[in-house]
Image (cartoon, rainbow, N blue to C red):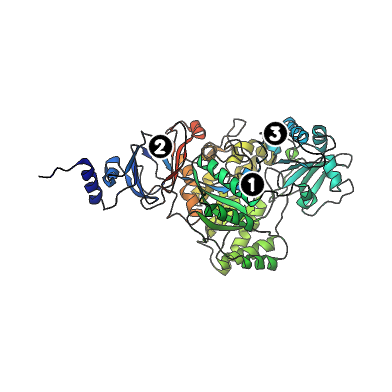
Amino acid sequence: MKMVTASMFVLLAAQFAGGETAECIYYNGKVVTAGSAPAAEAFAVKNGRFLTVGSTADVKKTAGPATKLVDLKGRTVLPGLMDSHTHPITAALSEKDGAIPTFHTIADVQSYVTKLAAGSKMGRTIYVPKVYASRLADRRYPTRQDLDKAAPGRVVLLDTGYNAVLSSAALAKVGINRDTPQPKNGRVQKDSAGEPNGLILGAGQLWSSLKPPAAASVADQVKALQSMQAAYNAVGITSTVDRGLTAEGFRIYQELQKRGGITVRSSLTYLIDGTGDPKELTRTMEAIPFVTGFGDEWVRVGAIKVVADGGILLGTAYLREPYGTHTEVYGYDDPDYRGVLAVPAANLVEMARTANRLGWQMTVHTTGGGATDLLLDAYEAADKERPIAGRRFTVTHGNFPNARAIARAKKLGVAFDVQPAWLHLDGHVMKGVFGPERIRDFLPLRTLLDQGLVVVGGSDHMIRFDSREAINPYNPFFGMWMAITRRTADGGVLHPEQAITRDEALRMWTSSGAYLTFEEKLKGSIETGKLADFVVISKDFAKCPVDEIKDIEALLTVVGGKTVFQAKSY
């Protein structure tokens, strides 16, 4: 009688289990599937997909002589995490010439300006990106005098994207003085003597000439993208949505993919200018040679986007009513000011109709409630021509959805791309600006989910590599902790009744993100047949103390069955 060896036994077991043999089996773990299947102990991988998921005993039935076995030793495994709002190329390029510090005070900003001035030629713009007054202990922006003190006589530009602070030399260079008329799309702030104090709200055309030229070559941008994707992998991110690209940005992804360097599955948002004549906007959209869904499982076309208003952290978001009298942190005092609306309502309607007709998914940057309401008006107009249900139109940011906006979004099937980091980093300051009534509508995650809306977790990461100190922090566990606890940087809790559960937070960074990009059948959960994207983490996500969630680290990140990150401690 012929003896059956151990290797023959496992091969027979695999054939008995369905005839397919696993390339790799991960077993003896705590597998959080984030899908319809319950938690599991093990899973098998073959050809970049999950072959089977279940108990260690059942999964091992798919083993063959060449199958690699990985003992998870009781560690927790999550589906690959998805950040649904990033800007990885610009984030990486921001530190191309050196690390950018974290600014806690105006004195920190001044020290950085002095350092840059010492290392640059006279006449060259000293450029400081993304400083939020809400995150400075001084609770105000620097003035031109503050910048002048740090770098006397130098052209200094502190650029937040939706407003800016200019030194005296910078103001002079662009011809801004006490006689400069107020622009239609913003305002030049002046002191008690009627002189510009350096702060310009909106009106980017007044100071954009001071910005350093985009000198990054294609090679530099490809390298930047690859390096940031590696940083994302190191925190467990396996997919992302790049939320603002022109045609050049699409080519950077294409080039990195051609070189075989993509390690984060990427949905690319096509950013267009929403101003000007509505019919010209339609012609622009009709000229784009692709629509949502074009591409593959690594790089695909996502939504089309415009930026409708400014920033809630900057005092330029377009509100339903004036900001009021508690706006010191923004650097102005005008009880009638509502913010900046950059895209006319008629253009939003035209864009929504055209996107719906052409097959685009659409999203719009709206940080204030007034802008969100106008966007929902546009979505309703498009829906009247042909239903938008299933198009997965989205509100990007949407920081103040009131009850009426939530009901409208639910009826239309509109999703929300939100940034919980602003709850923690800025919520305590926003509370002072908006007061107790309006702050109830600030990122009401519990209500959004209870009403059945799809809500995805995004960081809006745009500056720096550090996952927890970046602007804005992209560490997904930090983001989940903020959504779960709603704890603010001053130690308080902002409307705890709007907190969500661990499972709900995890789905914001997994299955809901996959739904947003029409890929829920491909990824977002650990289930048989889906792409083998997963992360092994340092703590038990389901049972560790809640405040330890923010400290969870990725130990092993796998995309399509291939390891893209492994911690030294693993």
Q: Position of residue 269 (x, y in %)?
A: 59, 55
Residue position for label 3: 136
For this orientation, the residue located farthest to the left is 1
Q: Amino acid at mark 1?
A: Thr
Q: CA distance from mark 1 to mark 3?
A: 23 Å
Element type at marker 1?
A: helix
Q: Position of residue 537 (x, y in %)?
A: 44, 36
Q: Position of residue 412 (x, y in %)?
A: 54, 59
Give above or below for 291 relative to 62: below
The first of marks 1 and 2 along the sequence is 2
The reply to whether callout 1 and callout 2 are in contact (CB within 8 Å) is no
Q: Is residue 332 visible?
A: no
Decide which of 46, 533 is in the foreground and name it: 46
Q: Which mark is residue 76?
A: 2
Asked if residue 506 lies left or right of residue 184, the reply is left
Q: How many C-alpha atoms fall within 10 Å of the one at disc 1: few (<14), some, or many (≥20)? A: some
Q: How many C-alpha atoms fall within 10 Å of the one at disc 2: few (<14), some, or many (≥20)? A: many
Decide which of 368, 204 is in the foreground and name it: 204
The N terminus lies in which quarter of the figure?
top left
The first of marks 3 and 2 along the sequence is 2
Decide which of 346, 161 is in the foreground and name it: 161
Q: How many C-alpha atoms fall within 10 Å of the one at disc 3: few (<14), some, or many (≥20)? A: some
Front label number (1 vs 3): 1
Decide which of 217, 490 is in the foreground and name it: 217
Q: Is residue 206 visible?
A: yes
Q: CA distance from mark 1 to mark 2?
A: 33 Å
Q: Which mark is residue 233?
A: none
Q: Amino acid at mark 3?
A: Leu
- Residue at coordinates 65% horizontally, 67% vertically from top-left? 282
Q: Which mark is residue 90?
A: 1
Front label number (3 vs 2): 2
